[in-house]
Amino acid sequence: MAGPDLDELVGRAREGQPRAVARLISLVEDASPRVADIARALTPYTGRARVVGLTGPPGVGKSTSTSALLTALRSEGLRVGVLAIDPSSPFSGGALLGDRIRMTDHATDPGVFIRSMATRGHLGGLSWATPQAVRVLDAAGFDVVLIETVGVGQSEVDVVKLADTTVVLLAPGMGDGVQAAKAGVLEIADVFVVNKADRDGADATVHDLKQMITLSRRELRGPSWRQPVIRTVASKGEGADEVVAALRAHHDWLAAHGELTRRRALRAQEEVAAIALRRLHAELADLHDGDRLAGLADLVVARELDPFAAADRLIADLKG
């Protein structure tokens, strides 16, 4: 893609044209050689969107909750982009679930953009290209970007590295809330949502969460955000407005305490490190395809070199 073509594509994406937005996300997801150029072109227009991560164990109703949130956000006139991170197909590498069926009510809404992205083997419940896709949606003028992650358990905490606000969803009958907290997933929450709150056990789940929050706050010093626990019945749209209000309150708290800038700085650090590691991995793969690594391996097998010394030599070659 020539420079002028990229500039035109970026321009059309900034105008909110869905095809242009989709094309840019496809380019970053496919690791196009122009990814760096795309990031360079988009970065001046970013920083306005609120990035919200939705996570939780399988079966809590994340997609239904996302759809309900879309409805509530759109009722306030906000443009919303959704990145639904799906498990990868072992054959094609593409998203198994595709654009979420439960979100089809919003498919024709010009103020909503929904994209499924495959994890492609990336641990942590997020695709490696997700930060770049967030940048595309931010630059395209979306007010809120929702990231719905794969329900993979503890490794899903990666979402906190991308989101300004992280919502953890639970549901009654899915195990003891305090026990779940020990797994580490709940520690990342800024907002707790107990979905399917019309079912038996909802009161106990809410109670456990509030107890956990009270216990954890005893160890804190200085100003801190107290995570709200909100009941929802996403399938009926109940509680979505309360969740939106909590998201707004948390964003205001972040801005007032300088936490928004700090979180975004940490996000930038993670992204820069990930890009650097990816490039180093590519260079290492080039050495692997050549004779250098094979030669070092032969020396290790012959006990003429230990593996750590061999790795040092390989790194020295990379530094070149």
Image: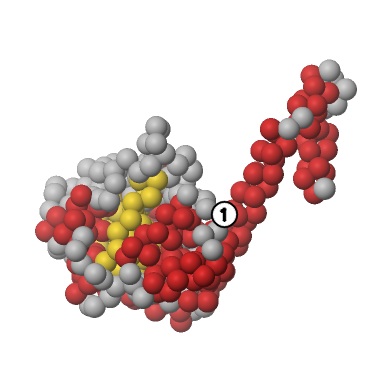
In the image, residue 216 lies at what x, y percent?
44, 59
Is 293 on the left or on the right of 285, as rendered?
right
The image shows residue 291, relative to residue 122, as above or below, that is: above
> As drawn, which residue projects farthest toward the bottom?
256
The residue under the point 43% across, 74% down is 11
| Crowdedness near tag 1: few (<14), some (14–19) or many (≥20) residues, C-alpha within 10 Å | few
In the image, residue 244 lies at what x, y percent?
27, 70
Residue 255 sits in quarter: bottom left
The residue under the point 20% across, 67% down is 109
Residue 193 sits in quarter: bottom left
The image shows residue 139, relative to residue 213, as above or below, that is: below
Q: Amino acid at mark 1?
A: Pro
Q: Read off the residue under disc 1.
A: 33
Residue 20 appears in the figure: yes
Is 314 on the left or on the right of 195, as rendered?
right
The image shows residue 254, relative to residue 20, as above or below, that is: below
